[in-house]
Image (cartoon, rainbow, N blue to C red):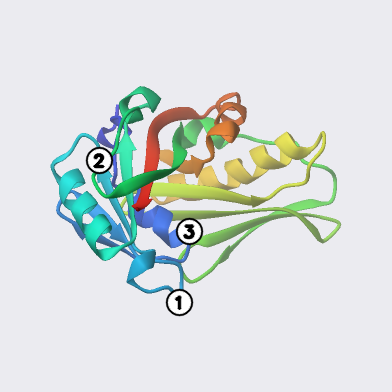
Amino acid sequence: MPEQHNTPAIGWVPAWADLLGRTAEAADAGFVVGGEPGQVVEGQEYVALWPGQDAEEFAAKAAGEGGRLTLLCADAGSADGLAPGGLTRASERVLLMAPTAELNTDVELPENSQVALAPMETYDAVEITVFDRPVARGRVQVRDDFATVAITEVPEGPEKEMFERGLFAAMAEEAFLHGAEYLHMVVEPDAAGHFEESGWTEAGRLVGFDKN
């Protein structure tokens, strides 16, 4: 199994930051992710593995300078009880992974559908149209052989899963062509189960802390 599929891994973070229009700089074994465009230091996010040697150092910086500490834990159990000094637990997200080969499949979309990819500044936008009307949108970015994706718009209703699979198939093909064997996606905990039913696997928990 590829090294990047070990749980947890952190090399996907720069590609994930690209999806959000944010910067990511390596800092020892972790990353400092810049704030949203226009934000100052307080918008920075320090991302590190837990357990890991950088977690305590990043916690001190987040508590002293402001910003957010995000710890990537192996699972929900590993995240229980975490309470870095000077910080308050603020969020929990799920890291999902899926092999590109399993998602890059033919999806039967409605007639007169088209799937298009358009290069943006820091990612590729994926769009499905029906009769030239956009119905589903997503983003994919490949960086250093790590691929991250996000679904930004899908219609509610019986066709939702079909359009999701159509987006994932296009994203997986793009990632595979650029040498990435897995897709990474960050979602809210209540959405993880839905995606796990369609080929995704939980690979870690992202626990966020803010300054007290």
Q: Residue at x 67, y 40 (%)?
A: 164
Residue bearing mark 1: 38
Amino acid type assigned to the residue bearing label 1 in the image: Gly
Q: What residue is rendered at 59% in x and 34% in y?
A: 191
Mark toward the viewer: 3 or 2? 2
| Mark 1 Cα shell of 10 Å, populated few (<14), some (14-19), many (≥20) | few
The tag earlier along the polypeptide, 1 or 2, is: 1
State whether residue 21 appears in this view: yes
Task: Depth check: give the residue in front, 120 or 107.
Answer: 120
Under circle 1, the secondary element is: loop
Whole-angstrom CA distance, mark 1 to mark 2, is 27 Å
Q: Are the two marked residues, 1 and 3, in contact with CB atoms closer than 8 angstroms?
A: no
How far apart, in angstroms, are the residues tagged by discs 3 and 2? 21 Å
Q: Which residue is mark 2?
A: 49
Secondary element under disc 3, as helix, strand or loop, is helix
Left or right of residue 115, residue 50 in this image: left
Label 2: few (<14), some or many (≥20) within 10 Å? many
To which residue does mark 3 refer? 19
Residue at x 52%, y 41% (from the top left corner): 187
